[in-house]
Image (cartoon, helix red, strand yellow):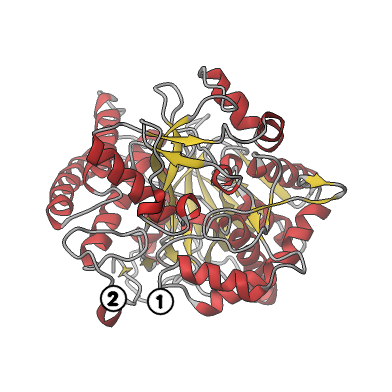
């Protein structure tokens, strides 16, 4: 038996996008937030750097827009970027009103500068900005009687007409089927509006800065439901994650380079001047490729990030979390260079949305990393992501506020059917296939690509997809199986998108087409299941 739960607004995900939106939507109706692990498990909670916004007279909207467009390599939607930059500052101020404690100096907000930015415009909470934002939003959500947060609920499928066996090109989302992973019970959440805020897909790759929940669930579910997916080839690899066997790709924030950190090879030589006049302050894609190139040329497993020339007290003040974490691994960053290596960090593509976060499915919205708003184009400018979540969460709320009274939950849907399935006999298939997908993506669909590598990856992922789908049809649903299925689907979308783009632009670099081709490819890569 499947429990049916009805609400005005359903939010899938509990990061900055989902919670900021939920707090606003609670003003006009009942909101249920479901999250597959604990409420604080989100990409937001791991965000170190900060939030970029024009908040001083020394900065300007025009400069922030120009920096964003430059990073996006010709694929940004100008209207989306303009909306982000001009509406962003008021939402940063809203966070402060909600209780977020950003770092201050002499009583005023302290601003950092990161790669690709022409000004000091990044507000931060030391080097744990995401954690502080998450803390404040969760506290406010817990105090709101119109918001219920349900932990340990894994989403299975978005509910649409195809569950009624109706064929239509005008698809509506009515909610989601979910599994309560603590009780094993299935639940059918029916909502007037659904917000996808499921975060990114870092665990499609072997090395990632993302938390374990980032398995591309929202993208995979939206694709299977018929939503348009854009630009999945643009995967941002953070150039500097801590290289240590026990560190699990701990991120060394961009702000360390903004602070004056210098990249060096293992013999201590600087190298970024060979790749970009901005040296270590170049955008992430350039820095990541430069590190990848130096490592491959020299046969090294890592490079160094050096801030030992900065005062010890300043390092500890600016980066207390990084200092303490590195010290746990025996590295004193005030005296020793930090060994770093690139790792998958952010997906610039995702579920296609308009300026009000509406997807191509009726009543389905998407916000945060799961969405492709047009802001990032072919490469995300550092610290624009949390700002994007705020701006488009608010815009989704405005759109829903106008339409909520006109929508009724009158359609009845069947319970989740798992008849004919059995408990899995071998969990090793799930863990093995997951590891194999991640290894394939790391080896063949990484920072530097080629037709040969992509075709090899496609063949291997197709086999894993066929094997896993057969297993899924005969096996009782589990969170692990759902994640594997979603990881495989997103991997195939990344590969398909990369094969379609026969040029090098932004984060997508291929040795077969090393130049940018504005004549044929200054367009979004669009994928849709039907």
Q: Which numbered disc covers residue 476? A: none
Q: Residue furthest bottom?
A: 519
Disc 1 vs disc 2: which is toward the camera? 2
Image-based side of 407 in relation to 401, left or right = left
Could you tell me which secondary element the residue under label 2 belongs to? Answer: helix
Classed neighbour count for the residue bearing mark 2: other residues with Cα under 10 Å, few (<14), some (14–19), many (≥20): some
x%, y% of residue 474? Answer: 25, 38
In the depicted structure, whether residue 441 falls above or below residue 390? above
Mark yes or no: residue 474 visible.
no
Viewer-closest of 91 and 299: 299
Helix, strand or loop at label 1? It is loop
Where residue 249 sits: x, y (%)?
44, 33
Q: Quadrant of the C terminus?
A: bottom left
Is the Cβ of the residue at disc 1 closer than 8 Å to that at disc 2? Answer: no
Q: Residue at x 70, y 61 (%)?
A: 25
Residue at the image point whose x is 47% and y is 32% from the top: 184
Say whether residue 305 is visible. Answer: yes
In the rendered structure, the answer to whether residue 187 lies left or right of residue 318 reads left
The residue identified by callout 1 is 170
Q: Position of residue 89 (x, y in %)?
A: 72, 65
Image x and y of residue 433, in percent:
24, 34
Precedes in sequence: disc 1 or disc 2: 1
How far apart are labels 1 and 2 at the CA level?
28 Å
Say which residue label 2 marks.
521
């Amino acid at each position: 038996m499947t429990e049916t739960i009805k609400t005005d607004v359903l939010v899938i995900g509990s990061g900055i996008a989902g919670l900021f939106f939920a707090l606003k939507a609670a003003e006009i109706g009942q909101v249920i937030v479901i999250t597959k692990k604990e409420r604080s498990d989100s990409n937001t909670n791991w965000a170190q750097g900060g939030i970029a916004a024009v908040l001083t007279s020394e900065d300007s909207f025009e400069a922030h827009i120009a920096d964003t467009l430059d990073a996006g390599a010709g694929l940004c939607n100008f209207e989306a970027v303009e909306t982000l930059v001009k509406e962003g500052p008021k939402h940063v101020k809203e966070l402060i009103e909600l209780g977020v404690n950003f770092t201050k100096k002499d009583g005023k907000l302290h601003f950092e500068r990161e790669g690709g930015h022409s000004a000091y415009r990044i507000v931060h909470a030391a080097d744990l900005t995401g954690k502080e934002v998450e803390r404040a939003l969760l506290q406010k959500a817990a105090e709101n009687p119109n918001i219920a947060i349900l932990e340990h609920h894994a989403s299975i499928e978005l509910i649409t007409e195809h569950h009624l066996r109706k064929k239509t090109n005008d698809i509506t989302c009515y909610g989601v089927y979910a599994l309560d992973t603590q009780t094993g019970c299935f639940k059918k959440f029916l909502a007037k509006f659904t917000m996808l805020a499921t975060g990114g897909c870092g665990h499609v790759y072997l090395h990632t800065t993302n938390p374990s929940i980032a398995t591309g669930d929202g993208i995979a579910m939206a694709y299977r439901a018929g939503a348009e997916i854009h630009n999945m080839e643009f995967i941002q690899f953070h150039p500097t994650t801590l290289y240590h066997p026990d560190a699990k790709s701990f991120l060394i924030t961009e702000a360390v380079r903004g602070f004056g950190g210098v990249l060096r090879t293992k013999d201590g030589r600087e190298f970024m001047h060979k790749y970009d006049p901005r040296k270590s302050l170049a955008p992430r894609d350039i820095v990541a490729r430069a590190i990848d190139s130096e490592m491959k040329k020299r046969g090294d497993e890592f490079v160094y990030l050096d801030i030992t020339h900065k005062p010890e007290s300043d390092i500890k003040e600016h980066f207390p979390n990084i200092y303490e974490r590195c010290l746990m691994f025996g590295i004193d960053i005030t005296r020793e260079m930090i060994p770093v290596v690139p790792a998958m960090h952010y997906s610039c593509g995702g579920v296609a949305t308009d300026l009000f976060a509406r997807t191509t499915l009726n009543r389905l919205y998407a916000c945060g990393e799961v969405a492709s708003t047009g802001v990032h184009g072919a490469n995300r400018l550092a610290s624009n992501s949390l700002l994007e979540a705020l701006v488009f969460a608010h815009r989704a709320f405005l759109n829903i506020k106008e339409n909520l009274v006109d929508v009724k939950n009158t359609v009845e849907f069947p319970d989740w059917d798992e008849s004919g399935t059995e408990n899995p006999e071998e969990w090793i298939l799930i863990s093995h296939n997951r590891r194999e997908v991640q290894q394939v993506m790391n080896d063949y669909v990484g920072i530097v690509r080629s037709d040969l590598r992509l075709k090899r990856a496609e063949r291997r992922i197709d086999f894993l997809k066929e094997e896993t789908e057969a297993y899924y049809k005969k096996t009782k649903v589990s969170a692990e199986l759902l994640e594997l299925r979603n990881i495989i689907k997103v991997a195939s979308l990344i590969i398909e998108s990369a094969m379609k783009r026969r040029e090098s632009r932004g984060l997508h670099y291929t040795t077969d087409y090393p130049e940018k081709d504005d004549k044929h490819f200054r367009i979004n890569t669009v994928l849709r299941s039907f």
